[in-house]
Image (cartoon, rainbow, N blue to C red):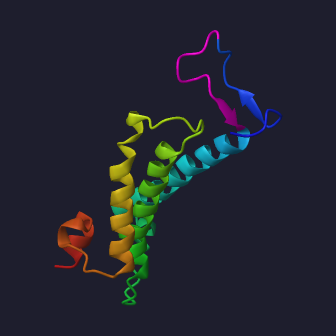
Amino acid sequence: MGSPGVCRLVQRLERAPPLAGAMVCQDEAVVLVGLILGGVAAMALVLWSRGGRTHRARWWADKGTGDALDERLVLFFLPGIALGLWGFALLYDFSGSQVQWWRLPALPALLLGFVLIMWGGLQLPVPRWYLPAWLRRRRR
């Protein structure tokens, strides 16, 4: 919660639904939008790259240099970052109030994001089923 000069009342308390009477700081709203848009951008790049419909979309698999960093970026790091950003956006608490149970589904997203980032960071083997179908066919 910020100072009254920085924050604004979302809706008048007389007409507000039960959860909408909290004060939201403009800076906090920018953080929330940034988290959501950052996750959307990362996941859009992942889906486009994993789809591999064009030669340009296969940028991470067509190098042939033996460097697996691009592959780990697309398969593990970016999806993990996107899930982490979305999970954190759901858990981000503007009001400082009690625990809100509807936010608990964000925990699996955070956990899966952490597992994906660690899997890529520890350079564990990539399971064959996790590769896109077009890449599995190419590597036979």
Task: State whether residue 12 is above or below residue 44.
Answer: above
Q: Which residue is at 46% across, 54% downward?
A: 44
Task: State whether residue 79 is above or below residue 139.
Answer: above
Viewport quadrant of the C terminus: bottom left
Q: Residue furthest front?
A: 98
Please tell me how many numbered marks the rendered image carries. Answer: 0
| Nearer to us in this view, 138 or 79 | 79
Residue 53 in view, yes or no: no
Q: Which residue is at 41% across, 39% downward?
A: 103
Q: Which residue is at 39% across, 69% downward?
A: 117
Residue 4 placement, left or right of 118: right
Q: Position of residue 10 (x, y in %)?
A: 67, 25
Give the extent of the magenta segment: 14-25
Residue 32 falls in image quadrant: top right
Q: Which residue is at 40% across, 87% downward?
A: 67
Residue 80 falls in image quadrant: bottom left
Residue 26 in view, yes or no: yes
Residue 119 falls in image quadrant: bottom left
Q: Position of residue 129 (x, y in %)?
A: 18, 67
| Nearer to us in this view, 59 or 14 | 14
Q: Position of residue 43 (x, y in %)?
A: 44, 55
Q: Does residue 88 show up magenta in the picture?
A: no
